[in-house]
Image (spheres, rainbow, N blue to C red):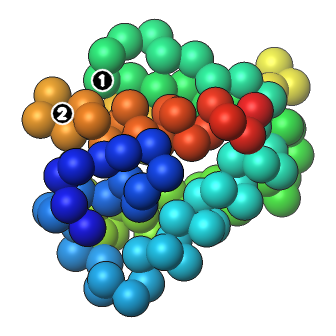
């Protein structure tokens, strides 16, 4: 994967430690999560993304598990899963040097929402 993050390309940066052959599978997992659970995509800041998900324990577990695995290979991500007031949200933050990755992630999620 490269730092050139065109919308239709895999969005992981070269800093990702996930084996190259597994990267398309991880992207497919994110795409499925987005398509099946994302209700709204918000960008509260340049380095932050908020995905409002369809509430439910299965969606919460799925998002948490995927976020934990992603953080294992791309440790620059910060994921916060919030369950409150009947809603479910996954917030994603990155440091400034990885904002292009967040941009690509937001675009992929937005296409599905």
Q: Which residue is mark 2?
A: 95
Find residue 55 and name its label: none
Please report contact status of discs 2 and 1: CB closer than 8 Å, yes or no. Answer: yes
Q: In this rendering, would 91 be left or right of 70?
A: right
Q: Quadrant of the N terminus?
A: bottom left
Percent of width and height locating residue 41: 63, 24
58 with respect to 79 (left or right): right
SS state under label 2: loop
* Residue wearing tag 1: 47
Secondary element under disc 1, as helix, strand or loop, is loop
For the residues labelled 2 and 1, the Cα–Cα distance comes to 6 Å
Label 1: how many residues lie within 10 Å, few (<14), some (14-19) or many (20+)?
some
Q: Count neighbours of disc 2 (C-alpha within 10 A) and say few if under 14, some if 14 to 19, many if 20 or more.
A: few
Residue at (38%, 32%) from the top-left corner?
103
Above or below, 112 against 44 in this view is below
Residue 113 percent location from the top left of the image: 75, 32
User: Where is residue 23 shown, x and y percent of the image?
Assistant: 41, 75
Up/down of 50 relative to 58, above or below:
above
Residue in the image at 86% along x and 25% along y: 86
Ranked by sequence position, the earlier of labels 2 and 1 is 1
In this rendering, the answer to whether 75 lies above or below 51 is: below
Q: Report how many numbered discs are placed on residues in the image.
A: 2
């Amino acid at each position: 994967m490269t730092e050139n993050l065109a919308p239709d390309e895999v969005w992981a940066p070269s800093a990702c430690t996930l084996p190259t052959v597994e990267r398309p599978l991880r992207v497919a997992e994110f795409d499925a999560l987005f398509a099946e659970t994302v209700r709204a995509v918000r960008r509260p800041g340049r380095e932050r993304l908020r995905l409002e998900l369809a509430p439910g324990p299965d969606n919460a577990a799925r998002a948490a598990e995927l976020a934990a695995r992603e953080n294992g290979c791309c440790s620059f991500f910060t994921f916060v899963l919030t369950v409150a007031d009947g809603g479910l949200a996954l917030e994603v933050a990155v440091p400034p040097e990885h904002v292009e990755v967040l941009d690509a992630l937001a675009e992929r999620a937005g296409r599905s929402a």
